[in-house]
Amino acid sequence: MKKRLGFHLSAAGGVYNAIDEAAELGINALQIFTKNSNRWTAPPLKENDIKLFHEKWRSSGDLSIISHTGYLINLAGEGENLEKSKTLMREEILRAHLLGIKYLVLHPGNHKERGVDAGIKSVAENLDEIFAEDETEVMVLLETTAGQGSSVGHRFEHIRDIIALSKCSSRIGVCLDTCHIFAAGYDISTPEGYVYTMDEFDRLIGFDRLKLFHFNDSKKSTGSKVDRHEHIGLGVIGSTGLSLLLNDERFNHIDYIMETPVDDVRDDRDNLAVVLGMLK
Ligand SMILES: [Zn+2]
Ligand SMILES: [Zn+2]
């Protein structure tokens, strides 16, 4: 495969299980949660599980593995919730480090009623506080958001500003989610819209920061600010826009991770077949 392509897969029953599933699917990129994504606490990774993970990863050949943080973390907030978020974020970084995972995806967070500028400042400050005491080399990838509720990160400017405010910006990269940016108002469904959006990204953030794609179609229209993933080509972005990104040779070194539904319409194998068919 000339592209780096795969899925978010469940690591239920052991973090290493997803590596077996990746091998069965024949993908070369994999994203996992290293803990339950809706809980504040998790039992520490067992030494034997870490060992198995490394063994399986080594024998898997050329497989990228990316970690996604749990959904409760909000580094744009304040108070007790923020303290819990920072503790959990430190644990997420440690877990990724122990598993040898280089990239950890983070949703920038929700500013609640404090305003987007306050949220941006908080994310930068809180990441800096965490990085200051952290000796790992795990890179945090800020994920573009759809703009639901009070989420920060639905404009490229937000991500640019977090990076600019951080004193440890060498530890920060970006994950671009196609469904999220489309819902946020970046219409990548047409060739003109695609070119404009990627130029904007490069102008405001820079392609050197871009480390990962979440490659999803969208159930909701552009500007809806509603985050609902759809099977590849069956959504409102559609095959034209997604194919432009998939076949953009500037990004041959970047992993494309699908977070598509598994339902009566299609499973992961079906979406993979569709995407392989789109590859030129
Ligand atoms: Zn995400
Ligand atoms: Zn999403």
Image (tube, rainbow, N blue to C red):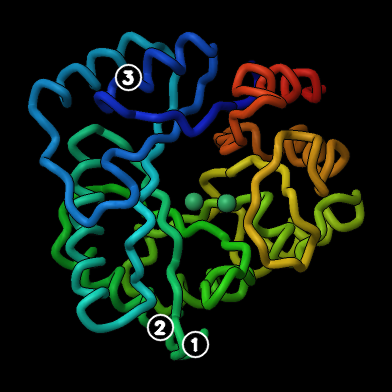
User: Dividing the image into 4 quarters, which one contains the C terminus?
Assistant: top right
**Mark 2 = which residue?**
121
Cα separation, mark 2 vs mark 1, equals 6 Å
Image x and y of residue 120, in percent: 45, 79
Number of marks in the image? 3
Label 2: how many Cα within 10 Å (few below 14, some 14–19, many 20+): some
Residue under the point 61% across and 60% down: 206
What amino acid does circle 3 point to?
Asn
The earlier-in-sequence mark between 3 and 2 is: 3
Residue type indicated by callout 2? Lys
**Residue on which the image places disc 3:** 17
Q: CA distance from mark 3 to mark 2?
A: 38 Å
Tell me the SS state at disc 3: helix
- Badge number at residue 190: none
Classify 31 as above or below 179: above
Amino acid bearing label 1: Asp
Residue under pointer 1: 117
The answer to the question of whether label 2 and label 1 lie on touching residues, with beta carbons closer than 8 A, is yes
